[in-house]
Image (cartoon, rainbow, N blue to C red):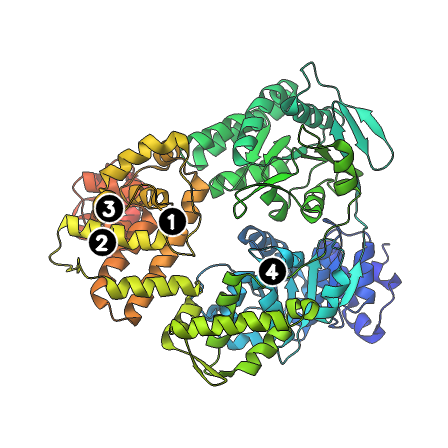
Amino acid sequence: MRVPILLYIKWNDSKQFYEMKEYLDELLRLLKYDSLYPPQEIALSKGVMNGNSILVTTPTSSGKTLIGLMGMINILNKRKKVVYLTPLKALATEKFNEFNIIKNLSYYNDRKIKIAISTGDYDSSGSELIDKDIIILTNEKMDSILRHDSNWINNVGLFIIDEIHLLTERERGPTLEIILTKIKLMPQKPQIIGISATVSNSDEVAEWLTCESIQSNWRPTELIEGVYNYGKVTMNNGTSYDIDNIGIPDNSTNAITSLAMDSITNGGGQSLVFAETRKRTVSLAKKTSEIVSKFLDKPSKQLAQKTGVEILKEGDDTELNRTLSSTVAKGVGFHHAGLGAKSRQIVEKAFRNGIVKILFATPTLAAGVNLPARRVIITSIFRYDYEFGGNVPMSVLQYKQICGRAGRPAYDKYGEAIIIADSRTNPEDLYNHFVLGVPEPIVSQLMDERALRVHVLGILASKPKMLKSELLHFFEQTFLSKYQGSQTIGFEIESLLTFLTDEKLIIMRNDLLMPTKFGKRVSLLYIDPKTGIEFKKNLDSYKGNIYDINNVSANRYENNVINFLYWICDCYDFYPKLTLRQNETAHFQRLFDKHKLDSCGLSNYDYSLKSLVILLEWLDESSEANLNEKIGVEPGDLHRMVETTYWLLYCLYEIAKLVERKDLLPEINILRLRIKHGVKSELIPLIQLEGIGRIRARSLYRAGITDVAMIEKISESKLGSIPKIGVKLAKKLKSQIKN
C-alpha cells in the first residue's frame, strides 16, 4: 500500500498540516507525483500552506506550479480569492487549463470552485469576477482593475506572480513593479507567491516584497550546456563530441540541421531551435524539412501529413501558412508572432505530441508557452532591438530562460542546450559568458519616461485627491526607490506633475493633487496620457466633414475614416508599428494613390502610413493572403493591429463624448464595427449576425440580401443555396431572426 508522501515532510504547524494533509495528498495523486521535488519540500517547510509569502527562484520544470497550488488550497479553504498574474495571454490560457485540476478535489465537492480568466477590456472593473475563486489575469489587466478600485480585490488572500524576473524588462517591468507595490500596501496583507527564473539578486527582491527566499538549481532533468564550433560540441560537464554533418558541407545552416538531426537519430529526441528573426525561422524550417522527411517512418509521415492538412484547413489562407503546412507535413515546424493563432496552436500541439521533430522559433517563445525539447539549439546570441534599431546580444538571463526549455521531465534523463558559434563570435567567449555566466541582477525600469507618466497619472486618478507627500511615499515603496534612492525619482515626478497639470489631466493646488474628469477618463481607458492628449487636441480642432447619418457623401465619409485611422496609427499606443520594406515600395505607392492619401495632406514617407494603408485595405475587404503577399503584413500582426485599432477607436469614442463631439460619435462607432470585421459600410447590418463573417456577408450581399429583413423574407432553401451559406447555417439564421 502506498504511504502518503506528506507524512515524511516536516511542517511548521502540524495541526494545520494534518487537517489538510489528505487533500494535499489527493492533489499530488491527481498530478501523478510520486514524490515532492526539493523546491516543493522547501516551500512546504517555509510555510507556503500557512499563508507565508515566498519568492521561488528555480529553473524551468522544477515544479513551481505545484507550489502555487499548495498555497491555493489553504486560501480557498479560508473562502478567500486567489489571483494568478502572468505577463502573456498565452500563459494565462495555459494556467487556466492547468488549474482546473482544483475542481477535481473531493475536498471542494460541497462547493464548486469557480475559475476565471480575463486578459482584455481595460475599461472595466472586472465586476464579472466578483464570485470567482481563482482569477487568472495578465499584469496589464490587473493594473486596470486596480485603477477601477474593484471591491472584490479586498477579498484576495493570495497573489501568485509568474515570471517576476520580468521586473527587469523595459516594456513589461514598470507595470509589474507598480502592481507589486500596490499589493504590498494592501490593508489585508495578502500572501504573495513569486515565481521567477534564477537571478543573481533574488534575495533583494524577496526582501523588498517581505518574502522568504527559496533558491535552488535543482531540476528534474539534468541540464547540460555547451558550444558548437566547426563540427565539435564542448559541454560544461567536461565532455565533448563530434557531430556528424550527414554528408553536407559545414556552414551555419547545415550546422543547425546536423545538431537537430543528431538528436533525432540518437534516441528520437526533439529539438527546439531559436533563430534571431522570423524570416530565419521560416528559411531554416524549409531547408531542414527536406532532410528530416527522409528519416521519418511511415506512421510518423502519416501523422505529419495529416497535421499539415489540418493547418491548411484551419489556418489562414496565406503563403506563410501554406509554407508552414508544407514543412510540418515533413516533420518540421516554425513558430513566431506573425503566424495566426490557430496555426500556432496546431504546431504547438504537434510538437508536444512528437509529430513535429524540430521546431524553429524566435526567442519570444522562451517566455511564452511551455514547449520542452531534448535539445535546445541557439543559432545566434543576437536579437533585434527595436529601440536600438539593430542587433544586440541577449542577456545571460534571457539565455538561461531559453536553456530552461531543454529536457522533457517525463521522457528525458537530461536536456542539452547548445550555442552555435559563428563568424561574429568567439566560441571560448560564448562558453565563458553564457554557459558559465550568472544571470544579471533584476534592475528596475520604472525611470522610463513613458512608464512614469502612465503610472503617476494612474495612481492620482484612482483617488479623488492626494497629497504630493502621499504620492512620493508610494514611490518610496517601489523596488526602484529601495535600491536606487528616492531623490532621483522625486525630481522626475515633480517634472511629470507640471506636465500633467499643463495638459489639464490633473489640478495641483499647493501640495494637493486632484485628477480632472479628462485625466481620470484617460487613466481608466488605460492609454498613455500623451495618446489621450493627442486624441483630445485632434477632436477639438476637427472642423470639417461633420457626419450626418442620413446625408453623407462617400468622399466626405472616406476622408473622415482616413483622419480617424491616421490618429490611431500615429498615437503612442498603436501596435504593432510596421516599417516599409524595399520590395513593398511599389505596391505601397499604388495603394497610397488608390486611397488618395496625398489629398489628405499625408506623405508616403510618414512612418505611420504603412499601418494606415493596411487598415484601409482591411476595410476594403482585402484578403489576409493579399495583404501578406503585397504589403508584407503577416496574419498574427494583422490580428494584433486590428485588435489594437478596435480598442483605440473605443478610446477615441469615449474622449469624443467627453469633449462633446457628439457629431462624430455615430461615425466612430460604425468605423469600430468595420475594423472589427474588416468590411465596407454596406455589410454592417449583415456582419452582426452570428455565424456571418466578412466572406459570408459579402456572399449574401452579392445575392441581393442587403439587410436582416430580406433574410426574414427569403425562403430557407433559397437562402441555403447562396454560396458559403448552406442549409445548416440558413436554418440558424432564420432561427436567429425569428427569436
Label whose residue precedes the other's in the sequence (2 or 4): 4
Q: Is residue 590 visible?
A: yes
Image coords of residue 35 (percent x, y): 82, 53
Q: Amino acid at mark 2?
A: Asn
Q: Residue at x 49, y 67 (%)?
A: 453
Q: Amino acid at mark 4?
A: Gln
How far is disc 1 from disc 3 in space, using C-alphas? 15 Å
Q: Amino acid at mark 3?
A: Lys
Q: Is residue 32 left or right of residue 88?
A: right
How far is disc 2 from disc 3 in space, using C-alphas? 14 Å
Q: Amino acid at mark 1?
A: Val
Of the residues tagged 2 and 4, which is closer to the observer?
4
Residue marked by disc 2:
560
- Residues at discs 4 and 3 in contact (Cβ within 8 Å): no
How far is disc 1 from disc 4 in space, using C-alphas? 29 Å
Label whose residue precedes the other's in the sequence (2 or 3): 2
Residue marked by disc 4:
445
- Where disc 1 sits, the SS reads helix
- Where disc 4 sits, the SS reads loop
Q: Is residue 603 left or right of residue 39?
A: left
Q: Residue at x 77, y 49 (%)?
A: 438
Please, is residue 177 above or below residue 468 in the view? above
Residue marked by disc 3:
680
Label whose residue precedes the other's in the sequence (4 or 3): 4
- Residues at discs 2 and 3 in contact (Cβ within 8 Å): no
> Front-most of 250 and 359?
250
* Tag shown at residue 642: 1
Location of residue 586 by image quarter: top left
Please, is residue 523 above or below residue 513 in the view? above
Of the residues tagged 1 and 4, which is closer to the observer?
4
Label whose residue precedes the other's in the sequence (1 or 3): 1
Image coords of residue 390 (percent x, y): 55, 40
